[in-house]
Amino acid sequence: MSNLDREAVPSLCGGRGFVVAEPVRELLSPRHVKLGESTEVRRLLPNLGRRMVGAWCFVDHYGPDDIADEPGMQVPPHPHMGLQTVSWLHEGEVLHRDSTGSLQTIRPRQLGLMTSGRAISHSEESPRSHARFLHGAQLWVALPDAHRHTDPRFEFHADLPVVTAAGLTATLLLGTLDGTSSPGTAYTPIVGADLTLTGGTDVRLPLERDFEYAVLSMAGEAHVDGVPLVPGSMLYLGCGRDELPLRADSDASLMLLGGEPFEEELIMFWNWIGRSQEEIVQARRDWVEGTRFGEVKGYYGAPLSAPELPPVPLKPRGRVR
């Protein structure tokens, strides 16, 4: 998914200088952003004061939206570099196309994982004939310097491993949880899991002490380490945890995001992640001139235009504003 904000501003991310090295309970409020004609998202990352969780650097939650009489998600071709996109649905379907020739319909609890590497472009749209409701999350993972110029690729995994406990089902998107690993390609120590809690659940989820974590509420109401979470909110948890208490009086769904704190400092502008002003300027020039990012074939419509660069220099900084 693209960042469609026409007043794009640089996000200065990464670096360990502001990592919370102990457990915390920091509730993040979303910013509402319009995507296309009928989709509004709740943006949790980057957030004022909190830019990353491990290598996770962008989190949008959308829906459930009734799109029975609407076009649904319609995101024209747009570029990415230096990151991975993770498409995750609870309801509906999204048709993915990209400049490597990939064409894939993604459905609930199936992983669409696109590694942009040095450059890729893609589009996302609800199929012409689509389900009534659309509900999901779109996430980005920053690529470390050693892998950010890799060849672009798209992975699709319809069947993902599951970790279970009393009242808990955890579907693993990326990384490793409780000894179980996802087939999705990861370039940093990371975890992403979809948690389904049945009513009456009171369980403790094992964690990695060196990871920092956050939990996004997708549906229902659950208590995460004693903090009630409603859909569309996210709780940052810091580091230093061996386990996470979870409780739900009624059915609820969450997403667990975590990983080793990302050491490198980044610049995130529009749909690109770079390390310097020059890289972002070149990426914009290449997109405007139609080079490097390839062509998305089969999408009927014009690609997105890049926003203007800000008048001040872009500089990589730390993890918080």
Image (spheres, rainbow, N blue to C red):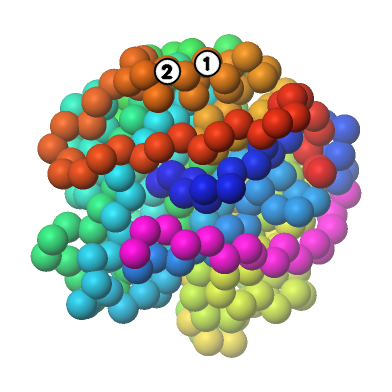
Q: Secondary structure at mark 2?
A: helix
**Residue at position x 57%, y 70% in the image:** 232
Residue at the (52%, 80%) spot, across then down: 220
Q: Main secondary structure of the magenta part?
A: strand
Q: Is residue 183 above or below residue 95?
A: above
In x, y percent, where is residue 9?
Answer: 65, 42
Give neighbour class at mark 2: few <14, some 14-19, many 20+ (Cα, 10 Å). Answer: some
Q: Give yes or no for contact between labels 1 and 2 (Cβ–Cβ under 8 Å).
A: yes
Amino acid type assigned to the residue bearing label 1 in the image: Gln
Q: Which residues are magenta?
A: 22-37
Whether residue 27 is in magenta: the answer is yes
The residue lying toward the viewer, choosing from 207 and 58, is 58
- Residue 48 pos. (x, y %): 76, 54
Q: Which mark is residue 81?
A: none
Q: Residues within 10 Å of mark 1 (few under 14, many from 20)?
A: few
Report which quarter residue 313 is drawn in: top right
The amino acid type, in three-letter code, at marker 2 is: Asp
Q: Residue at x 39, y 54 (%)?
A: 88
62 relative to 16 in the view: left or right: left
**In the drawing, what numbered circle is on residue 282?**
1
Residue 297 at least partly seen:
yes
Q: What residue did someone put label 2 on? A: 286
